[in-house]
Amino acid sequence: LSCDDNDKIARDWFAGQAKALGCKYEVDKMGSQWATLAGENNNIPPIGVGSHLDSVQSGGKFDGPLGVITGLEVLKVLKETGKKTYAPISVISWTNEEGARFPPGCMSSAVWSHQLDLDYALSCTDTADNVTAIGSELQRIGYAGSKDVSHETNPLSGHFEIHIEQGTRLEEAGLDVGIVEGGQGMRWYNVSLRGVTRHTDTTAMAGRQDALVGAAKIVLEVERIGKEHGGMATVSLFKLSPQNFCNIPSEVDFSFSMQHPSAATLSIMTSIESFIYSTASASNLEVAAYDNVWTFDPFSFDAQAVQCVEDAAKDEGFSYKRLISHTGHDSIYTNFLVPTAMVFTPCKDGISHSPKEYASPKDCRVGAQVVLGAAMRYDEVLRKKFG
């Protein structure tokens, strides 16, 4: 998880790899790690190859680390072959992409792209206790860097990211890679319902203020909306109190997310707000909180960067298709400011956020070759522009 002791071990490993490659190594105030290999023209911003090392409570080995390790492999290939790129190349390990411990996700890339305030981000707290802040945990593990977090202080000329697909489209089609054109939008909400606790055995059913019953109706409505509109809608974090056999739950806190590739449809889906308030009212419950904590709209990646990815796959003879991303990635936020594209690699049975998450060595190798090829093609774009 982001900023826990295992995260420190992974970060230390990344730092060691970067220094062994002779990179310029920096850590910014959000704890993101930057490893930069010089190019012919170091007066222009680097081409970024980035992803994340943090995971989720039930996570696997590939979601995130595949992208960071691929970036380091790109640098190793350049060093071992003696190839000097025109632009510098930066490998970035972005902090807290998942948001599993410290919501919202894509935190450091959102700060870098001016979509999230630095002080607010550093004050975000652990979902386990709602007290421990990510800023204090960065200090504890020794990764509260001194470099300012912004495109102005750590600029990029572009950004490429490889990621497991987290779905079955590539596997079912028997394709080598996915060329990601863009992705669907998302809304993430935190909801708190408050009722009154009473004895379960002696309180009449009529007139109960059962926060769990009200929340259960909302959970089913979230699912119904996702199915009806052909999107995704999930309640994924759920806490209730008191938790015992003989008290009616009076406090329920939960989170839900909604995703759809159409901004108009996503707007219709999020009209669930009126249902939440009417359901609470009918059950004599208080909506103590209804907060939109993470949001991004459907998006398209830069056409030229995407074409660099497609040309790299095509020239290597790899089979591919263009597709969209169904979830959030740091590349969504770099895309606000610089040309960005992504590569998807197949993963077994589409499983992700699970210890069963798996991508074969062959698929990882193919994806890494495409990332390298895309970065080299984009480097030539910059050479023609600035050289």
Image (cartoon, grey):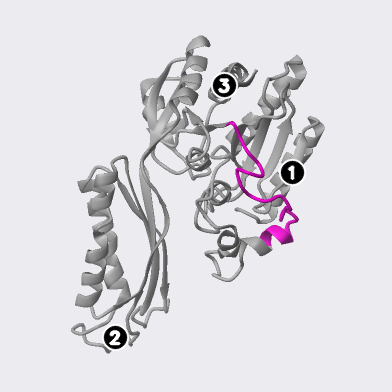
Q: How far is disc 1 from disc 3 in space, using C-alphas? A: 24 Å
Alpha-carbon span between mark 2 and mark 3: 68 Å
Q: Secondary structure at mark 2?
A: loop
Dot in front, 2 or 3: 3
Towards the viewer: 84 or 125 = 84
Q: Is residue 69 left or right of residue 332?
A: right
Q: Which mark is residue 201?
A: 2
Looking at the image, is 156 positioned above or below residue 105?
Answer: above
- Label 3: few (<14), some or many (≥20) within 10 Å? many
Type of residue at label 3? Tyr
* Label 2 Cα neighbours within 10 Å, binned few <14 / some 14-19 / many ≥20: few
N-terminal of the pair, mark 1 or mark 2, is 1
Which residue occupies 36% across, 41% down? 298
Q: Is residue 111 magenta?
A: no
The residue segment tinted magenta is 137-157
Q: Where in the figure is residue 79, as x and y percent of width and height?
A: 76, 21
Kindly report the secondary structure that dominates the magenta region of the rendered protein. loop
Position of 78 with respect to 202 (left or right) is right
Q: Residue 249's x, y, as percent?
A: 36, 78
Residue 378 circle label: 3
Please name which of the two marks, 1 or 2, marks the residue nearer to the observer: 1
CA gap between label 1 and label 2 equals 61 Å
Q: Residue at x 72, y 24 (%)?
A: 39
Name which residue lies at 59% across and 31% down. 157
Question: Which of the labelled discs sits on residue 26, or is there none?
Answer: 1
Q: From this view, report whether residue 59 is shown above or below residue 163.
A: below
Quick one: label 1, few (<14), some, or many (20+) residues within 10 Å?
some
